[in-house]
Amino acid sequence: MRRAPLWLLVGGCSVAFLAPALAAHPSGSGRIGDDSGAALLQRAADAAEDLDYQGTQFVAFWAEAGSTSAIVEVSHVAGEGSVMRLEPTPQNPAGAVLRSGGPGAPDVVGFDPAALALLKRNYETARTGGDNVAGRAVDVVAVRRPGDSPVARFWLDRETGLVLRREVLDGDGRTLRASAFIRVTFGPTSDRTMDRATAADTPQASGEPLDDAAVAALRDGGWRLPEGLPSGLELFDARLTGAEDESQLHLTYSDGVSTLSLFQQRGRLDTDSLDGFRRIRVGATKVYASTTFPRRVVWSGGGKVFTLVAECQQDTLEGVIAALPHGEAPRGLRSRLRDGFDRVGSWLNPF
Amino acid sequence: MSHLDDWAAALVDSELTSDERDGALAHLAGCLDCRVVVDDQRRAKAALASAAAAPAQPSADLTARLLAIPTGEHESDSRDVVRRAGAATPAVRPRGSRPWPSRGVRPVPARRSNLRRRALSGISVIGAALAVAVIAGGEAPGQVAPPVGTYVVEHTATTTRLPLQDQVANVVLISHR
């Protein structure tokens, strides 16, 4: 029999001893094929707005290049926002203290109704049983396409509704990302070390979301703005920054679980600028990709440089890459000849 | 300080209870040694799963190239066909071998050969000029270096409100990008 090491006694806290009595493994029970989890997720979205809470979360990501892990102290005050303190780790020795932007800004663990509607359009959300997270009883909600294995799970506090744990899985059931409270308390905080006034703001997206008229004008101008991408990814945010040749288009797609940002710039790819990328074949084309999380893929096509930042399964990513232009679009032969003779003529004519 | 030791394998194999797993994952945040062990075991498991799912098979390209290699019997057949038809060169011959000798091909008279050579030269010059014009007229777009690190920040900022994203996780992503 394995002996529990010190990390478990400290990191797992007292909840480890409550687990056998309360826990039912999420994969072992429950009914799939209904949306019994939808109401629980809606309650979770509301709870994140209304509650004061403090605690410690771990965050972990896995990718081909290895994993990333961190411990974050979290303090949230309803109506004010959140303060997050990243504890120093071997990967990030400096740590950091950040705050969300106040009223109307994203909550630490919340999500908005439109995003939840997107999830429910594409997936079944079924309650699959009970479990135990940070010493608290939770409901487990599995997210899956009809007939498939789960692609994500939520662990929702049974008393308050708050999301205490969430994870995203790949097509083989391996965890791609996970975050969970290992300690959480509710109510006003007395912790003065989480000073909101001295914390830095969390990064905000550049530019303003584009309206329909702006999207149509960009399409007319030769930019690629598909309403949807393979695997049910829907366009839910579009922004343009910079001007003229320096313009950068940022399109964000999701199906509620997978997320993918597509960036476009005019020009062709400067491959010397890529650090940590390697050239790989995807279907019939070659692109430059990193093996970190989230996945980053870069290539040129049709006079544009495309950059994907993706948190999705491999087959989804490959489908998206195949659906976008590759290689430079050929110009008309007559126009190239005319321009070419003009240019050669200018070389030969000293006047 | 204690380490995961054989709990690392249990974590990779999903054999831990929820609280054991979360305690182990929290431990990984501060322990580089254990993270390396878990990453290695995870990669090894994935490699084994891939190998089991897809038994080794020669690629289509390799198969086509192997099939294209002429056997001695085919070579002999080809030679017979060439002899019978009086053709100059069989379609397929071993790489590096010399062409089959020409048979039954009449030599071209010298004057006609010179005319043909001049015509070919003229066509070549015109072709080269057109090629230069096409190349010179092909306006290559300017080179662009995408700011990928900044794009990761922009990505996290626009996806924070999605159900399976959260600001804590995204803050970690940004700090480790």
Image (cartoon, rainbow, N blue to C red):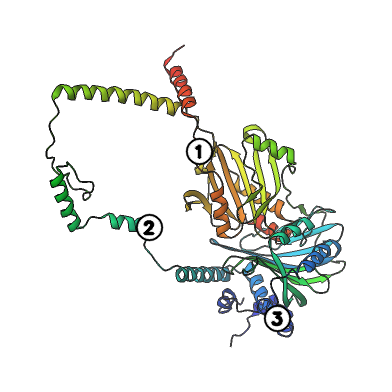
Q: Residues within 10 Å of mark 2 (few under 14, many from 20)?
A: few
Q: Residues within 10 Å of mark 3 (few under 14, many from 20)?
A: some
Is disc 2 on the same chain as disc 3? Answer: no
Label 2: element kind: helix
Query: Is residue A117 among the parts visible in the rendering?
Result: yes
Residue A26: x, y in percent? Answer: 68, 76
Q: Residues within 10 Å of mark 1 (few under 14, many from 20)?
A: some
Q: Is residue B26 left or right of residue A286?
A: right
Give me the C-alpha separation between circle 1 and circle 3: 55 Å
Residue denoted by label 2: B60
Residue denoted by label 3: A24
| Amino acid found under the numbered disc labelled 1 | Glu
| Amino acid found under the numbered disc labelled 2 | Ala
Query: Is residue A276 among the parts visible in the rendering?
Result: no
Label 3: element kind: loop
The residue at the point 32 percent across, 23 percent down is: B125
Give me the C-alpha separation between circle 1 and circle 2: 28 Å
| Amino acid found under the numbered disc labelled 3 | Ala
Residue A115: x, y in percent? Answer: 75, 57
Q: Quadrant of residue B119?
A: top left
- Chain at tag 1: A
Q: Is residue A341 left or right of residue B34?
A: left
Q: Quadrant of residue A111?
A: bottom right
Give me the C-alpha separation between circle 3 and circle 2: 48 Å
Q: Are marks 1 and 3 in contact (CB under 8 Å)?
A: no
Residue denoted by label 1: A328
- Looking at the rendered image, the quarter that the N terminus of chain A falls into is bottom right
Question: Reading the chain from its start, which is encountered first: label 1 or label 3?
Answer: 3
